[in-house]
Image: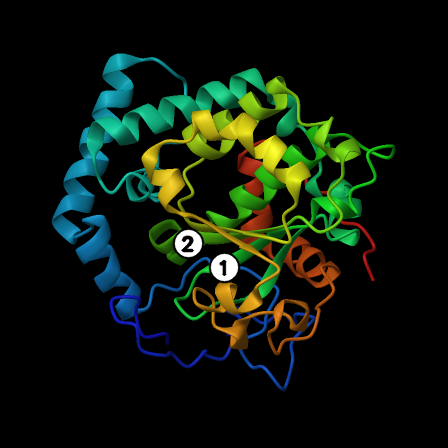
Amino acid sequence: MPQLILSNSERIAPAAVIADDRKPVGTDVDFPDVLADLDVNAMPDDVIEYGRVRVGETEESRTRLVAELEDMIYEKGDVTPHRMDEKFLLRFLRARHFKLNATYKLFVNYYRFRENHPDYYSINPLDLSFIADLEVLSVLPYREQTGRRILIYKLGNWNTNDFDMNEILKASLATLELGILEPMAQILGGVVIFDMNGFTLQHAYQITPKVVSTIFDLIVYSIPMKTYAIHIINESWVFETVFNLFKPLLGKRYNEMLFFHGKNMDSLHKHIDPKYLPKVYGGVRPNYPYQHWLINLQNNATVVKEMESLGYCIVPKDLH
């Protein structure tokens, strides 16, 4: 397993492991860490240690704060959660480093977002596969050198005449809800790359104040998924114009995790080892079809059950 994150030394990517007898598609003999599927059980020793040192998670804190959070939710009665099991509550505690009041606020925000946007959950996420087909949004089927997954947006691939920003936000939420199912992601968080190549004024006009507000409600205040770093590449003056809408809303923490690289891939490589990047970003990896994720996930009974518990309707589709 990866060396942790507590040191700057290079890690060796582990071979991907599937926990049941399914035969997933999309593996790569040249890169044994490639697997477009979720591991909802893995918690390597180095990640446990990272959780203890950086997140404040120990057996004692986990037992105590899950109980205290549960009591607080029942006593205050601000929201009516659809589930209260330890596994579910833990994702919120991990997202706020086991700080009880901050965790409770996140929990309430999550349920208020659900109440205000029921249409984001009453869908079959597979119906949004056209967004993945265009690579407007994708997740690499392997982790980078610190064990984190990489989410990539290519908004320049978005034809605004075909669908609006709301569809991208629905796909983003479903992707994040899927990502949170991995205990490793709950502790380590994820990395985001915004590839702004081809982003034009036509795209910028779709980023209205209402859209900006929804993005912040979702990504910053409501979803229990930590963002470790956000990398902006191939940005132009058009992006900078849109970014100025967001900038006043960004707190210190988000400003510190933003990195602007332009077309300088060497700058990006200071943060993400090129061994874990596609060739288009100066890496060594091929471009893997996103359909592999969709095929494997709809065949993963654990994932389907978890997503249906959130309100999603997973109707299998022929994605080959």
* Residue 239: percent from left, percent from top: 64, 39
Quadrant containing the N terminus is: bottom left
Marks 1/2: CA–CA distance: 8 Å
Question: In the visual, does 60 lie left or right of 45?
Answer: left
Residue placed most toward the observer, 40 or 214: 214
| Three-letter residue code for mark 1 | Arg
Residue 82 appears in the picture as rendered: no
Residue 191, x across and y down, in percent = 48, 54
Ranked by sequence position, the earlier of labels 1 and 2 is 1
**Label 2 neighbour load within 10 Å: few <14, some 14-19, many 20+:** many
CB under 8 Å between callouts 1 and 2? yes
> Which numbered disc, 1 or 2, marks the residue closer to the eye?
1
Residue 27 appears at what percent x and percent y? 65, 76
**Residue found at x 25% / y 42%:** 97
User: Residue visible at 30% across and 66% down?
Assistant: 5
Say what amino acid the circle numbered 2 marks.
Answer: Ala
Find residue 116 and report its horizontal and vertical position in percent: 55, 16
Q: Secondary structure at mark 2?
A: helix
Provide the residue designation for mark 2: 185
Residue placed under numbered mark 1 in the picture: 149
